[in-house]
């Protein structure tokens, strides 16, 4: 590691009712990958927004290459070589790769844009990053992984000296993550300073040199990664030890009735002849590699995607299974199914609306007096769920966009609990959520199951599947390739079935 290029010392920032940053310190050196970690709401994003000029700090100092600075907007930060690659990709799909990289600062020949130079400059950036992307390709035609690489190229084009990666691997495949790490290592060799924000503990151990931990808006400490254990970092993040032991036996009673039966479901090429049963009070894990068809199966059951054939039966009030017709999500909701999408910001919540408005979204009829909404009843029910789910918020009127990822997830869960859905589909329930919030979601899922709710849990994390499931359905390339009781489940036999297609 080289010279210190960034020092943030005693950074303080408050918003109405919230002390977001409380005298936070951060030091980054040239040629270093420095992890910034903490639970959702710990203040990581706020600290980076202060650094890049989105927020003005209340007190403290920022020293960059030996000079005290304060950027007033992201353009000033970029001009100085401080660039952030956001988790939410900020690209225009109908523009080319080159146009996206140089948008707003296109090279000119006279008064006209010099397309040839823009393409050549893009090629040089990709050569520097050692990646193969056609600058003339439209952005919308690229995979998420390649779009991420274009964001990095865009950052490098600003003559970047300090680059911030905010959850860069959240939507990437294992191969794309490997490619990302190669690029990061190359940038480190070029003596660049790198801040790496991630909740994935295994990544931190692989790619970073030092780790700074934040908790509740404050600075906890900085560790050398190779000298630290996963448990050390987690304990600093949450102030307590969190155990992730796998489940050793099913918590679902052996005589629990079947509440959902799916027979020979077909929905496009990603859902082929899928059959399974879900029992009352059971957490049924769905495991498989990327593209296995797990989410597509859930969407077909929920009516979000059309099914070609197969039957879906649900237990009625008489305790017997009855075949139901689900042509759309409204049919599924009426049948007692709630779906927590893997992309909660697109399909789970309306981020510009309040917690109250989101929580009652699936059952507004229950709060209606003719054409009017009973606001008092809405607020009372929402506040009950806020308390029950331990959602961290100043009030029920808080906009969802101002909540952390874990608390946004709790709002989605509240929506389906207010609807009183008996069958809940959790698709990647802890994606983008820190280890402490994960533990809260796990406890909540176990509580719901113990109260008789039935849960389908789709997860790409093997430890999560083994920790939470009573039984596991494994899929590969659109087909169910196995079903394993938790007592017999191991990473090895799950992976064996996840890589063995049945023709």
Image (cartoon, rainbow, N blue to C red):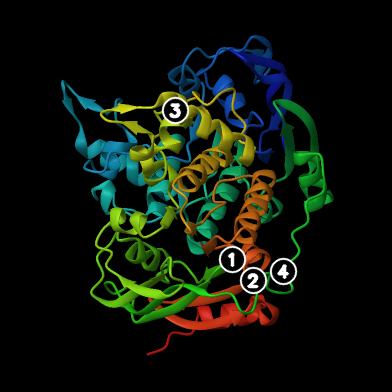
Q: Which residue is mark 4?
A: 247
Task: Say which quadrant the C terminus sits in.
Answer: bottom left
Q: Position of residue 216 (x, y in %)?
A: 71, 29
Q: CA distance from mark 2 to mark 3?
A: 36 Å
Q: Are marks 2 and 1 in contact (CB under 8 Å)?
A: yes
- Which one is closest to the eye, mark 1 or mark 4? 1
For marks 2 and 4 on the same chain, the one whose residue lies earlier in the sequence: 4
| Residues at marks 1 and 4 touching, judged by CB atoms closer than 8 Å | no
> CA separation, marks 2 and 1?
6 Å
Query: Which quadrant would residue 41 be assigned to in this image?
Result: top right
Residue 125 spot, x, y in % from top left: 40, 43
State left or right for residue 293 relative to residue 268: right
Q: In the depicted view, which residue is nearer to us: 397 or 422?
A: 422
User: Could you tell me residue 85's position as x and y percent?
Assistant: 48, 37
First reached walking from the N terminus: tag 3 or tag 4? 4
| Residue 21 lies in quadrant | top right
Q: Dot 4, crowdedness within 10 Å: few (<14), some or many (≥20)?
A: some
What residue would you read off at disc 2? 252
Q: Residues within 10 Å of mark 1 (few under 14, many from 20)?
A: many
* Point 34% across, 37% down: residue: 101
Of the residues under marks 2 and 3, which one precedes in the sequence?
2
Foreground tag (2 vs 3): 2
Mark 3: few, some, or many residues within 10 Å (few <14, many ≥20)? Answer: some
Which quadrant is home to the N terminus? top right
| Residue located beneath label 1 in the image | 281
Q: Which mark is residue 354?
A: 3
The residue that appears at 39% across and 76% down in the rendered structure is: 262
């Amino acid at each position: 590691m080289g010279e210190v290029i960034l020092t943030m010392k005693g950074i303080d920032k408050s918003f109405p009712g919230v002390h977001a940053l409380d005298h936070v310190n951060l030091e980054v050196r040239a040629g270093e990958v420095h992890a910034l970690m903490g639970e959702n709401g710990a203040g990581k994003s706020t600290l980076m927004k202060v650094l890049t000029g989105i927020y003005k700090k209340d007190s403290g100092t920022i020293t960059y290459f030996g000079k005290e600075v304060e950027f007033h907007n992201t353009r000033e930060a970029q001009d100085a070589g401080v660039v952030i690659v956001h988790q939410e990709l900020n690209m225009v799909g109908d523009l080319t790769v080159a146009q996206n990289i140089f948008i707003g600062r296109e090279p000119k020949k006279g008064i006209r844009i010099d397309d040839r130079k823009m393409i050549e400059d893009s090629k040089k950036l990709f050569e520097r990053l050692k990646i193969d992307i056609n600058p003339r390709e439209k952005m919308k035609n690229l995979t998420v992984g390649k779009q991420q690489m274009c964001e990095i190229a865009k950052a490098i084009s600003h003559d970047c000296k300090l680059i911030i990666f905010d959850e860069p691997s959240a939507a990437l495949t294992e191969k794309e993550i490997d490619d990302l790490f190669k690029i990061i290592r190359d940038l480190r060799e070029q003596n660049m300073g790198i801040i790496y924000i991630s909740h994935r503990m295994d990544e931190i151990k692989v790619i970073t040199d030092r780790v700074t931990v934040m908790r509740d808006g404050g600075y906890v400490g900085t560790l050398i990664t190779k000298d630290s254990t996963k448990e050390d970092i987690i304990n600093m993040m949450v102030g307590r030890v969190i155990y992730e032991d796998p489940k050793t036996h099913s918590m679902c009673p052996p005589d629990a009735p079947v509440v959902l039966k799916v027979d020979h479901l077909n929905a496009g090429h990603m859902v082929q002849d899928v059959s399974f049963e879900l029992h009352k009070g059971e957490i049924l894990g769905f495991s498989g590699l990327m593209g296995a068809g797990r989410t597509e199966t859930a969407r077909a059951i929920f009516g979000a995607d059309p099914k070609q054939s197969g039957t879906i039966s649900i237990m009625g009030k008489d305790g017997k299974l009855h075949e139901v017709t689900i042509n759309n999500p409204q049919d599924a909701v009426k049948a007692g199914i709630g779906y927590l999408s893997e992309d909660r910001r697109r399909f789970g919540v309306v981020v510009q609306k309040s917690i109250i408005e989101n929580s009652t979204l699936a059952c507004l009829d229950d709060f209606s007096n003719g054409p009017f909404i009973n606001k008092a009843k809405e607020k009372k029910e929402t506040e009950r769920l806020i308390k029950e789910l331990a959602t961290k918020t100043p009030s029920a009127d808080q906009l969802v966009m101002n909540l952390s990822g874990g608390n946004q997830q709790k709002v989605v869960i509240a929506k389906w609990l207010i609807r009183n859905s008996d069958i809940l589909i959790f698709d990647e329930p802890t994606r983008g959520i820190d280890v402490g919030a994960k533990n809260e979601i796990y406890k909540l899922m176990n509580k719901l199951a113990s109260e008789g709710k039935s849960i389908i849990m789709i997860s790409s994390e093997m430890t999560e599947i083994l920790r939470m499931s009573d039984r596991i359905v494994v899929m590969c390339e659109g087909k169910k390739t196995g079903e394993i009781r938790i007592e017999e489940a191991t990473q090895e036999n799950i992976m064996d079935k996840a890589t063995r297609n049945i023709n």
